[in-house]
Amino acid sequence: MRRVVVTGMGALTPVGNDVGTFWNNIISGVCGIGRITRFDTSEYKVKIAAEVKDFDPSVYMEKSEIRKTDLFAQFAIAAAAQAVEDSGIIGSVEPDRLGVYFGSGTGGLETASNEIEKLLSSGPKKVSPFYIPMMIANIAAGHIAIRYNAQGPCIPIVTACATGTNSIGEAYRTIKHGYAEAIITGGAEAAITPIGLAGFTNCLALTTTEDITAASIPFDKRRSGFVMGEGAGALILEEYEHAIKRGAKIYAEIAGYGSTCDAYHVTAPNPEAVSSAKAIENAYKESGMTEQKGIYINAHGTSTPLNDKTETLAIKKALKENAYSALVSSTKSMTAHMLGAAGAVEAIVCILALQNQIVPPTIGLLEPDPECDLDYVPNKAREASISLALSSSLGFGGHNGCIAIKKI
Amino acid sequence: MVLEKVTEILKNYSDTEGVNITKETTFKDLGIDSLDFVEILMELEEKLSIELEIEENFATIGELVNYIEQKLK
C-alpha cells in the first residue's frame, strides 16, 4: 500500500506570513484579531477581523500577475511558493505526476464586487476581461499549476470552511491510489471585504463584540459567533518511497481521511452530530491507531454557540472513551476563522504539534461551557507526548472533513 | 501623440523592464496576451475618449496606433 507524507509547508496567516513565525505565535498564544483596516466599517455591525498583515505579493509574483489576480489567489500562490521551495520537489517528479488540489471557500469576492459595481454604474462594456478568471474559485489552483508545470490532476475543492481539509484529504487519496506522485494542496481565502462581511454578518455567523479578547473564544460559554480570518495554507503531499528516494525532509504522514455530509441544513450543523462524528471516526479508524494514547485534535472550534457543542459531541461519538484523554484545541482562537484556508493551516498546526510534541492552546477560554467538557488546552500551550493528530473541519452546506496525521 | 499614450499604458501591462517600445514592437514581445489587450483597449477608450472595437486584433504596436489614429480623424 502506498503511503503519503508531507514534505513541504507554506502559510500566510493573521499571526505570521511564514510557517516559522506562524508556529511561534500559535504556541505563544498570540491573537491575530484587530479592527478591520481594509475599509470603513462605521456602517457595519461587525468591526473586527483577523487580517493578514504586511503582505507583499511582489515577493512572489510579477507585477502583471499581481494586477490580474484577486487577493485570495495571491495568498494561495504565496503559500504554495513557500511550500514548494521548502520541499525541493520541483525537478524530481514528472509534470504529469504532479497535481494541485487547492481550493477556496468564496473565491474572488472583492473582484466580483468591484466588477458588479462597474457593470451597474457604467454598463457591460466596462467589465474587466479578467473579471471571470480573477473571480472563479478554482483559479488559484490554475495559477499554481501553471507556475510549477503541474500537469497531473488539478482539482479545486469548494466545501466552504471544510475546503482546506477536504483538499488535503482528496489529495492524500489520489496519491495513495496511484494517480499522482506529489500534490500541492491547501486552501486560500480573502473574504474580508464589504460584501463578505455584510453577508456573513447577516447570516448570523459572526460575533458582534468589539472586544478582541472575547471575540473568538471557542468552547467558552460566552461565545457568540466566529470572527472572519483570511490567508492561505499549502502543503506538499508526496508518496513515501518517492520522498525517501530523493532524500526529502519528511514532516509527517497523512494516515486517514473522512468525508461526509450532514444533509441537514445550509448553515446549522445537525445537533446529533451523526455525520460529523462519522467523518472523524473514519479518519481515526483508517489511521490504524485507535489503540494508541496521545491524540491531539485540532478542532474546527469556530466559537459559534452551535458548532462547538456539536463538535464536542462528534468527538465523543467518534473517539468514545478516548475522547476524554485526547487534547483538543481550537487555534481559531488566534487565527480567527480562515474559512477555506482554515483546514490547511490547521493541518500545519497538527504536523508541527507532532514534530515538536507541543500542543497549542485555545486562548480566551475563561468560562467553560458544561456542554463542552473535553480538555481544550485552555490558554497555555502544553508539552505532551502525542503520536496522532486529527484535524476536523465543518463547512456551510453540511460538509464534514477530517484528516489523521501520524508522527514519522 | 497616440504612440506616446499607448507606450505609457503598455509599460503598466508588461513585466519587461527597459524595453524600447517602437511601432515595430509586437504585443508578443511584451508578453501581452489577448485578455491584456482587451483591457488596454478599455483604458485607451477612457484616456482618449473614443470607442474601440474589442474584436480588433493587432500584432504590432504600430498597427494599433494606426487604427486609433484612423478613429480619431
Image: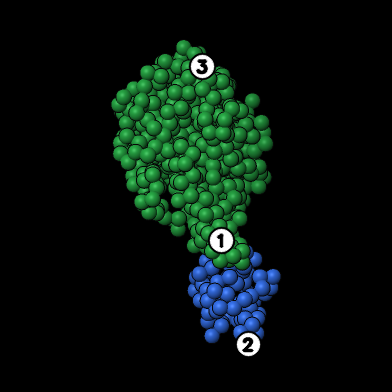
* Chain A rendering hue: green
Few, some or many C-alpha atoms within 10 Å of disc 3 (few <14, some 14-19, many ≥20)?
some
User: Residue A210's spot in the image, x, y percent?
Assistant: 32, 41
> Which structural element holds mark 3?
helix
Few, some or many C-alpha atoms within 10 Å of disc 2 (few <14, some 14-19, many ≥20)?
few
The residue where tag 1 is placed is: A120
Q: Indicate the amino acid at tag 2.
A: Lys
Front in this rendered view, residue A396 or A189: A396
Front in this rendered view, residue A7 or A48: A48
Q: Same chain, marks 2 and 1?
A: no
> Which structural element holds mark 1?
helix
The residue where tag 2 is placed is: B73
* Chain B rendering hue: blue
Chain identifier of the residue bearing label 3 in the image: A
Q: Indicate the amino acid at tag 3.
A: Lys
Quadrant containing the N terminus of chain A is top right
The residue where tag 3 is placed is: A317
Compare marks 1 and 3 and give the one earlier in the sequence. 1
Chain identifier of the residue bearing label 1 in the image: A
User: Residue A191's spot in the image, x, y percent?
Assistant: 48, 47
Report the Cα–Cα distance between label 1 and label 3: 51 Å
Where is residue A222, by image quadrant? top left
Whether A208 is drawn above or below A283: the answer is below
Report the Cα–Cα distance between label 3 and label 2: 78 Å
User: Residue B36's spot in the image, x, y percent?
Assistant: 59, 66
Few, some or many C-alpha atoms within 10 Å of disc 1 (few <14, some 14-19, many ≥20)?
few
